[in-house]
Image: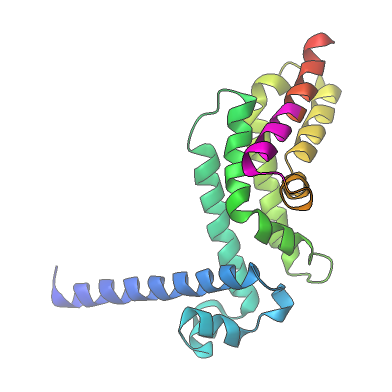
Amino acid sequence: MPPRDYRQSARADAVQDTERQIVDALIALLAERWFDEVTLDDIAAAARTTRQTVIRRFGSKVGVLSAMATRMDASIRAQRWGTPAESVADIVAFLTDDYERTGDILVRTLGQEARIPEFAAVLDRGRKGHREWIEDMFRVWLDRLDDQARKDRLAQLLAQTDVWIWHLLRRAQGHSATETRRLMTQAIERLLREDETN
């Protein structure tokens, strides 16, 4: 590789590393604080960079949030669609493993949705991705139903797999990760058994 190309490649890598550090900083901060309590200076300090660098790379705090959402979306898609699921237990295991990593930040973000308009696009993208994944994972069960029954069952599956259910069992009621997975699996299996008996 010619020296000039090498320098350009090294510079591009350094930019990506800085951007990754900035996004990582926001993720860490949101695990402890509300979004409107986090400043650009906080993000810069946590990323060991300057406020100007954060602005130059992302434009604003909302720009960092958008980059964080894009990364989380890609990670969730890779995690959830990466391995085929053969049972309801498999599906719930993928989901709860994901929630163990991202659930607390998601709940904190959802809790601010009404106060921070910029969250709408981020959260809508997450909801759309979750819906696509649920439709895909439960296709075998859903495709057996007529149109109205399918819509009803999909709505129920979306509710049963929502991050708030995980949060209620895991955080509010204090169940272990294993117990939370078992309880969610049982509830969904019970729901799907209704279709087999009708």
User: Residue 72: image x %, image y %?
Assistant: 56, 56
> Which residue sits at x=52%, y=80%?
46
User: Residue 106: image x %, image y %?
Assistant: 69, 58
Q: Residue 167, relative to residue 155: is it above or below?
A: below
Looking at the image, what colour scheme do you see?
rainbow
Direction from residue 185 to residue 5 in the image, left or right = left
Direction from residue 163 to residue 70 in the image, left or right = left
> Which residue sits at x=58%, y=67%?
27
Identify which residue, 135 or 189, lies in the foreground: 189
Q: Quadrant of the C terminus?
A: top right
Magenta stretch in the rendered image: 175-186
Q: Which image quarter: residue 67?
A: bottom right
Whether residue 57 is in magenta: the answer is no
Q: Residue 191, relative to residue 167: is it above or below?
A: above
> Which residue sits at x=64%, y=69%?
30
> Which residue sits at x=33%, y=73%?
12
| Residue closest to the far top | 197
Q: Which image quarter: residue 1?
A: bottom left
User: Residue 2: image x %, image y %?
Assistant: 13, 72
Q: Residue 41, relative to residue 58: is it above or below?
A: below
Direction from residue 7 to residue 67 in the image, left or right = right
Whether residue 177 is in magenta: the answer is yes
Identify which residue, 25 or 184, lies in the foreground: 184
Q: Residue 107, relative to residue 24: is it above or below?
A: above
